[in-house]
Image (spheres, helix red, strand yellow):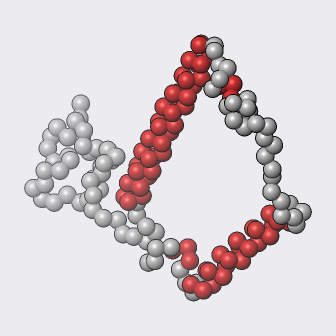
Amino acid sequence: MSEYPEVDGYPGWAVLVSAVVGLATAVLAVWAASGFTVSTEEMFRVAPTVEGGGVGTEWIVGNQIAWLDFLVALTHAADVIMGLFILFMVFLHWASFRRLAGRMRRPGERRREAVATDGGADTRPEQAGSSGPGADETGGPDGGETP
């Protein structure tokens, strides 16, 4: 089985040609949507320095409201903390699903002998002298104690 099972059976050149045609179609579609022009946006700047009083300089020079400055800093700190939490959750779920995928069986794969971890009963035929579930008087058929 190859690393990319979705392209099994296709020659490599066919996959490459398909990728190039797809990318070219996407680029042409964007170019057509823009009216077949090549344009660049210009930034309108008026004295973009602190000394010249450009856009955004009021936060460097003129912000004298202490509680507003504190709220801005608090918002930035909360943003960083929430971003780290989101990254943590993404990596936690990624690792969990990789582990879960490693335990799954592929289609047609035979079931291996394993312990019934979901609390279900062991369906294997018991052998003589076994000490498995139901072998003694205290165990019920599901492995728990009988009343």
Answer left or right for 126 relative to 111: left
Say whether residue 16 is visible. yes
Q: Residue furthest right?
A: 35
**Whole-percent x and y of residue 3?**
46, 73
73 on left or right of 135: right
The residue positioned 65% from the left and 23% from the top of the image is: 61
Residue 119 is left or right of residue 60, and the answer is left
Q: Is residue 110 above or below residue 125?
A: below
Residue at 48% over, 42% down: 87
Q: Depth check: 127 or 25 in front? A: 25
Residue 102, position in %: x, y?
A: 38, 60
Give me the residue at 24% from left, 38% from top: 144
Residue 67's place in the image compared with 129, above or below, is above
The residue at the point 88 percent across, 66 percent down is: 36
Quadrant that contains the C terminus: top left
**Number of marks present in the image shown:** 0
In-front residue for pair 2/27:
27
Identify the image quadrant of residue 68. Answer: top right
Give residue 17's position: percent from left, percent from top. Answer: 66, 82
